[in-house]
Amino acid sequence: MAGATAFDIAFIGHYTKDTIVAKAGTRLVNGGAYFYGSSAARHMGLKTAAVTRLAREDFPSFAPLTDCGVMVRAIPSEHSTCLKLDYPTDNPDDRILSVTMTASPFEPADIPSIQAGVWSVGASLRGEVSLEVLKTIKASGAKIGLDAQGYVRVIRDGTLAYDRNWPEKAAVLGLVDVFKADVVEAEILTGYRDLRKAAAELLKNGDMELVLTHGAGVLVWAGGTFYEAPFTARSQIGRSGRGDTCLASYLAARISMKPREATRWAAALTSLKMETAGPFSGTRADVEKALRERY
């Protein structure tokens, strides 16, 4: 594509200003799937780009990304997306989400300046990344990894609620190469909490790899086989962004690894991320050490 810059992987999604409420206390953090994901990919050594929308006053939030070498295309919006994440228990799948403001949706014109082999789509709620945007990405020849959360979540009376009625499901999943859902989202979409049963139902929508997360680890379907690896985090202080990091590290690993190896890599990197607040900022050597010692 003339004038475009080639990247190994690109991320798209709103920046989110997150208020996290847990037993340990309340804190305000910078978040968003693009934020957690692009940091993980860059620290794996990949040439990484990110496209986000946020209020100008929050532009300093992505300094940790540019500092480590991520190319960030920040598009100004009147507001940033502001979320509250309430974790009433120690189970990371048990949370209550609410929203006070949202940034403007992405547009197809946001895509062409970036050429990447893989795009990771990490929306916070339905309408953020439209079908038209996905078609633009697919037309570039890229593979698409997509998180269910941005398509099953809707705003109802200020709360992020799940809506199993997803009118564009077939069209969206027809464009996706890797689809990620957690156990709650998988049940919303399929009626099954058992992830292997949920996988069988999801695969009726097309030929894709699945990354399914739960409190204890990750289950992957790829090439006709299930692969599984546990999370081995020694603390949960950084559990916000777990799923974003898991999808990103799997997509990044799959550029050069087979599914079994990529599954273990994603579980190990995500485990290390959960032990520290904020995005993953370790090294490939840290992940390799975790794989040797914990798996």
Image (cartoon, rainbow, N blue to C red):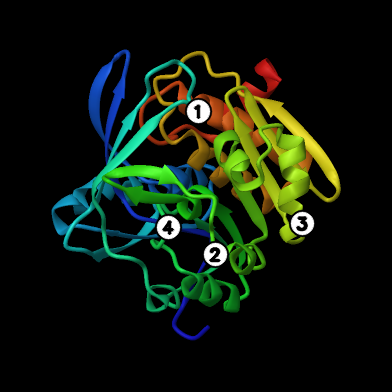
- Distance between the alpha carbons at the discs numbered 1 and 2: 25 Å
Residue identified by numbered label 1: 93
- Distance between the alpha carbons at the discs numbered 4 and 1: 20 Å
Quadrant in which the C terminus appears? top right
Marks 1 and 2: which is nearer the front?
Answer: 2
- Residue at image position (66%, 33%) is 193
| Quadrant of res 262 | top right
Amino acid type for the residue under numbered disc 3:
Lys
Marks 2 and 3: which is nearer the front?
Answer: 2
Please state the horizontal and vertical placement of residue 105, each as a whole percent of the image: 33, 66
- Give the residue at the far right of this rendering: 224
Label located before the other in sequence (2 or 3): 2
Q: Is residue 249 left or right of residue 26?
A: right
Pointers 3 and 4 in contact (C-beta within 8 Å): no
Q: Is residue 178 left or right of residue 259?
A: left
Amino acid type for the residue under numbered disc 4:
Arg
Please state the horizontal and vertical placement of residue 292, each as a whole percent of the image: 69, 21
- Distance between the alpha carbons at the discs numbered 1 and 3: 25 Å
Residue 258 shows in the view: no
- Residue at image position (50%, 28%) is 93
Residue identified by numbered label 3: 204
Residue identified by numbered label 2: 167
Q: Is residue 280 above or below residue 45?
A: above
Which secondary structure lies at badge 3? helix
Q: Is residue 120 left or right of residue 17?
A: right
Which secondary structure lies at badge 2? loop
- Residue at image position (51%, 77%) is 136
Q: How many marks?
A: 4
Marks 1 and 3: which is nearer the front?
Answer: 3
Q: Is residue 28 left or right of residue 90?
A: left
Amino acid type for the residue under numbered disc 2:
Pro
- Distance between the alpha carbons at the discs numbered 4 and 2: 11 Å
